[in-house]
Image: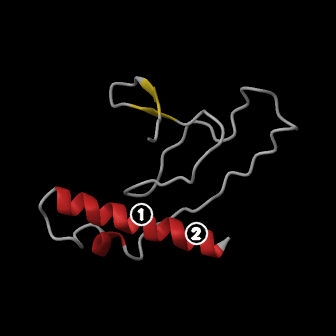
Amino acid sequence: MDSWGDTLHTALDTVQEMAAIGMSVPKDTFTKRTKGGSTLLAPTGSDLIKNDVGAVFAGFHYDISFMTIHGKSRYPGLSVWTRDWKKKTVKIP
């Protein structure tokens, strides 16, 4: 589990560096500000046999970090809400 968590954190650092480069700011602009900051790495283990179709595993909540990263999900259901409270399904190409 630690190895998987380290892999997710490394991927997130890469995304932060890419965002900085895309915004024409120094590559470490975001990574140096998030190093040692609040991090929540909590796998949402779900027993799909014990729960009905449509069960909510992680209800409406706020993420505490600058960016959020998820591993690939085999099941639909991740949604985000825009600032004008419109619900959108997250789709990763």
Q: Is residue 90 left or right of residue 47?
A: left
- Quadrant for the N terminus in the image: bottom right
Near mark 2 (Cα within 10 A), the count class, few <14, some 14-19 or many ≥20, is few
Residue at 39 percent across and 25 percent down: it is 85
Please identify the quarter of the rendering in which residue 41 is found. bottom right
Residue 91 placement (x, y as % from top left): 47, 36
Near mark 1 (Cα within 10 A), the count class, few <14, some 14-19 or many ≥20, is some
Residue 83 placement (x, y as % from top left): 33, 31
Q: Is residue 26 left or right of residue 31?
A: left
Task: State if disc 2 and disc 1 touch (CB < 8 Å).
Answer: no
Q: Residue furthest right?
A: 50
Q: Nearer the viewer, residue 90 or 55?
A: 90
Q: What is the basis of the colouring in this image? A: secondary structure
Residue at 54 percent across and 42 percent down: it is 61
Query: Which numbered tag is attached to residue 5?
Result: 2
Query: Which numbered tag is attached to residue 93?
Result: none
Residue 74 placement (x, y as % from top left): 65, 42
Please identify the quarter of the rendering in which residue 5 is found. bottom right
| Above/below status of 88 relative to 19 | above
